[in-house]
Image (spheres, grey):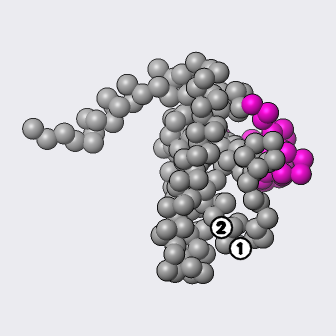
Amino acid sequence: MSISLETLIPEIQQKANFLHPDSILENFPNAPALQVGAFAKYEVQTDTIYLPEGIEKPYYYRLLFHELAHSLVHPSRLNLNSSGTFKSYPYVLEEITAELTAIILCAKTQQYAKNAIHHVNYINAWYKILARNRKKYAFSDLKKCVENAHERVLNIVNYTEINNFIYFN
């Protein structure tokens, strides 16, 4: 007997408890402020996430989750080092980690399908910079990003699952 992915996916989706995407930010303790901006970004000095208005929900959530991952660097949260300059090693790792966090949160909230190509392109662009500058260590650096993303997701989602029981059926 063979089991195909096509038959497993509906079964997994039926058994999974998906979080409502709005519950992620609503239940995040000490959440950063959310403002309209020309483009998506997180400002640590003001603890504010800026997102453009008028974008479709799946893309909005992808950007929100990415910037929410960046917000964990704030001293009131994980107090992570955010001193890297654009395209520097720490900056590249931070961007890859934030996008991996967004991927996991999009999957947990059923926002992944429309965002898949955007996730891949974003990570690929940053990974090329990483691989160019650290050829020998790029894969282990990527593994570190995955581990960091997992830690960030736990910090974000655990609050949501404990404090909120709004799930997709």
In terms of depth relative to the viewer, which is nearer, 159 or 119? 159
In terms of depth relative to the viewer, which is nearer, 81 or 33? 81
Judging by the rendered image, the residue that carries numbered circle 2 is 92
Q: Residue at x 73, y 54 (%)?
A: 80
* Position of 145 relative to 86 (above/below): above
Quarter where residue 77 is shown: top right
Whether residue 25 appears in magenta in the rendering, the answer is no
Q: Residue at x 58, y 39 (%)?
A: 154
Q: Quadrant of the N terminus?
A: top left
Quarter where residue 94 is shown: bottom right
Secondary structure beneath disc 1? loop
Q: Which residues are magenta?
A: 29-56
* Position of 29 relative to 32 (above/below): above
Percent from the top left, x then y, of residue 45?
Answer: 89, 51
Percent from the top left, x then y, of residue 44?
Answer: 84, 51
* Position of 133 relative to 74 (above/below): below
Q: CA distance from mark 1 to mark 2?
A: 6 Å
Residue 88 visible in the shown view: yes
Q: Residue at x 54, y 67 (%)?
A: 141
Residue 20 visible in the shown view: no
Judging by the rendered image, the residue that carries numbered circle 1 is 88
Q: Amino acid at mark 2?
A: Val
- Main SS, magenta region, reads loop
Q: Residue at x 81, y 42 (%)?
A: 76
Quarter where residue 9 is shown: top left
Do residues under tags 1 and 2 come within 8 Å of each other at their CB atoms? yes
Q: Amino acid at mark 1?
A: Ser
